[in-house]
């Protein structure tokens, strides 16, 4: 018992020797302030949102401030003597400068330094100090114009290809750009690809799978002066896309149900030219070689007695001109031209491919091997015909001119390769805009090989067409990252990262100080109890 009493006595002596200041909360001085208010925007009312930071907060009613002017310690002045009254409907005017004043009170053991400096929205502000320890910070801010609504968003992406990996090209326009924001997984340059069967966002290491469907999403941010609205019309690769707003400056634009293809570029329209039939001239069998296709002989069972280089000339449905004969055209007579075309490697004809031959709409037949046959009726021109040259026609590699006469349409001269001596990606002769490579190695070119998009074409397309007429008559001659589920909230909710605000940090610190005092109080109570116990025990011992 004596030993226990001795230990308690020593503890009490040690506690009595420790200065009281050790148990007091440490005072902190605030020397700089970086405040943010909702900037004035033309047509909008002033914001009076309370400001609360580490060790301070904005407070109303200090040193005589009027509630007719201040709310939550914030006031907006139009001039030295004119102000916005909180609760009125008055709004800011574009390009006009306003003064914002903020009264701040220090929390708990915090205090403002005598030479405290401050900024409001990044601008240097003046600081006035008061006897009660509070301060007033003020600066001028100019009202900006209201953001312009983005009416449309048009995006292009490399379509998914079986066994190929997705691309994540960054989008950057005058009004918006793509970037990752929030906690969405596997997002690069603000782009995600989602396997719709399991909801997993795939990565650059996950190739597209046959039979699966995918959704591509762009996380877009509006640039200064612009905003997204629910009326913003969106397309991806020309198809209508959905838009989900997280706020006026952030939107998610998505296109679903993308099925990986074979990677071949689609030829959806053709503009073919051949030397037109003319009185006394022999038929032309010059091979046609275009972007993604060429005329070919011997496919689909065509006879070399009829076709040469995939070209045949018929006098009627069952009578033809054999290549190599001396037979010539008769002026004013109709002839049927048939051209058998084969797609080049990496290309295919669209199911509804259309064609024109010498400017006339042609009938198109498709075959199971992917080739097509285009046919048209041409009238042989009479002698003395003079060509009337058109403007430049072009494709990816060449440019040329044709005769604009309705009975002719012949190619004038030869097709000539594009030249670009000044390296501006345009042909020096015809002005054709060449494809420009993107960072992913893809191009911005259109997959159509149409040379005259303004022209309208009509054609007869038969998926189950018969082979070219060869009737010969008596003739004159994922492993995927399945451990990372898609953030389901990204399509409909604000996915901004959560951070602890200055106010929360301050509250936590104040709470920590309170806990420290509770602990110290308990120690002192225990220590005092020990002294009382010691005195009582001492008296009892003397009584014996």
Image (spheres, rainbow, N blue to C red):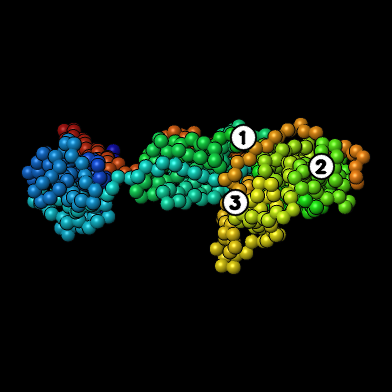
- Where residue 251 sits, quadrant-wise, is top left
Q: Marks 1 and 3, how far apart in space? A: 25 Å
Residue 248 drawn at (x, y percent): 37, 40
Residue 521 drawn at (x, y percent): 22, 40
According to the picture, the residue beneath numbered tag 2 turns out to be: 314
Looking at the image, tell me whether mark 1 or mark 3 is earlier in sequence order. 1
User: 228 or 533, which is in the foreground?
Assistant: 228
Badge 3: few (under 14), some or many (20 or more) residues near its Cα, within 10 Å? few
Residue 399 drawn at (x, y percent): 65, 57
Which residue is depicted at the point 17% across and 59% down? 115
- Where residue 512 sits, quadrant-wise, is top left
Question: Circle 2 sits in a helix, a strand or a loop, which is it?
Answer: strand
Q: Residue furthest right?
A: 474
Question: Circle 3 sits in a helix, a strand or a loop, which is it?
Answer: loop
Which residue is depicted at the point 16% across and 55% down? 127
According to the picture, the residue beneath numbered tag 3 turns out to be: 445
Whether residues under marks 1 and 3 lie with C-beta atoms below 8 angstroms apart, the answer is no
According to the picture, the residue beneath numbered tag 1 turns out to be: 213
Question: Circle 1 sits in a helix, a strand or a loop, which is it?
Answer: loop
Which residue is depicted at the point 33% across and 45% down? 147
């Amino acid at each position: 018992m004596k030993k226990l009493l001795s230990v308690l006595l020593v503890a009490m002596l040690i506690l009595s020797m420790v200065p009281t200041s050790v148990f007091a909360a440490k005072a902190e001085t605030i020397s700089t302030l970086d405040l943010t208010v909702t900037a004035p925007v033309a047509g909008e009312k002033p914001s009076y949102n309370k400001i609360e930071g580490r060790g301070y907060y904005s407070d109303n009613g200090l040193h005589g401030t009027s509630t007719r002017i201040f709310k939550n310690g914030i006031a907006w002045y139009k001039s030295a003597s004119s102000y916005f009254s909180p609760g009125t409907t008055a709004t800011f005017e574009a390009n006009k400068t306003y003064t914002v004043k903020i009264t701040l009170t220090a929390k708990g053991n915090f205090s403002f330094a005598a030479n405290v400096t401050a900024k409001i929205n990044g601008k240097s502000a003046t600081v006035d100090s008061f006897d009660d320890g509070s301060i007033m910070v003020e600066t001028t801010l100019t009202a900006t114009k209201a953001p312009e609504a983005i009416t449309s968003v048009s995006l292009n992406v490399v379509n998914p290809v079986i066994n190929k990996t997705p691309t994540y090209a960054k989008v950057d326009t005058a009004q918006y750009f793509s970037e990752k924001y929030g906690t969405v997984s596997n997002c690069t340059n603000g782009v995600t690809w989602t396997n719709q069967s399991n909801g997993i966002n795939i990565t650059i290491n996950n190739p597209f799978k046959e039979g699966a469907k995918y959704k591509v999403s762009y996380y877009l941010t509006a640039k200064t002066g612009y905003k997204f609205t629910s009326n913003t019309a969106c397309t991806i690769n020309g198809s209508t896309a959905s838009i989900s707003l997280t706020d006026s400056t952030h939107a998610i634009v998505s296109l679903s149900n993308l099925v990986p293809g074979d990677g071949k570029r689609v030829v959806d329209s053709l503009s073919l030219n051949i030397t037109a039939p003319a009185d006394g001239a022999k038929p032309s069998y010059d091979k046609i070689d275009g972007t993604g296709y060429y005329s070919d002989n011997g496919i689909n069972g065509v006879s070399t007695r009829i076709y040469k280089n995939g070209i045949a000339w018929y006098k009627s449905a069952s009578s033809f001109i054999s290549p190599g004969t001396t037979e010539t055209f008769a002026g004013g007579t109709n002839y049927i031209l048939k051209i058998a075309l084969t797609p080049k490697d990496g290309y295919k004809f669209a199911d509804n491919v259309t064609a024109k031959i010498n400017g006339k709409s042609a009938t198109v037949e498709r075959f199971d091997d992917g080739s097509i046959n285009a046919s048209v009726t041409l009238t042989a021109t009479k002698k003395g015909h003079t060509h009337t040259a058109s403007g430049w026609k072009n494709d990816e590699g060449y440019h040329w001119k044709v005769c604009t006469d309705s009975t002719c349409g012949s190619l004038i001269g030869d097709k000539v390769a594009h030249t670009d001596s000044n390296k501006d990606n345009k042909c020096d002769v015809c002005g054709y805009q060449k494809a420009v490579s993107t960072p992913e190695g893809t191009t911005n070119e259109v997959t159509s090989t149409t040379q005259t998009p303004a022209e309208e074409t009509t054609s007869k397309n038969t998926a189950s067409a018969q082979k070219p007429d060869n009737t010969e008559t008596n003739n004159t001659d994922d492993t995927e990252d399945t451990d990372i589920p898609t953030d389901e909230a990204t399509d409909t909710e604000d996915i901004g990262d959560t951070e602890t605000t200055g106010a929360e940090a301050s509250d936590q610190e104040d709470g920590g100080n309170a806990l420290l005092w509770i602990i110290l109080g308990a120690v002192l109570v225990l220590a005092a109890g020990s002294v009382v116990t010691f005195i009582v025990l001492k008296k009892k011992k003397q009584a014996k």
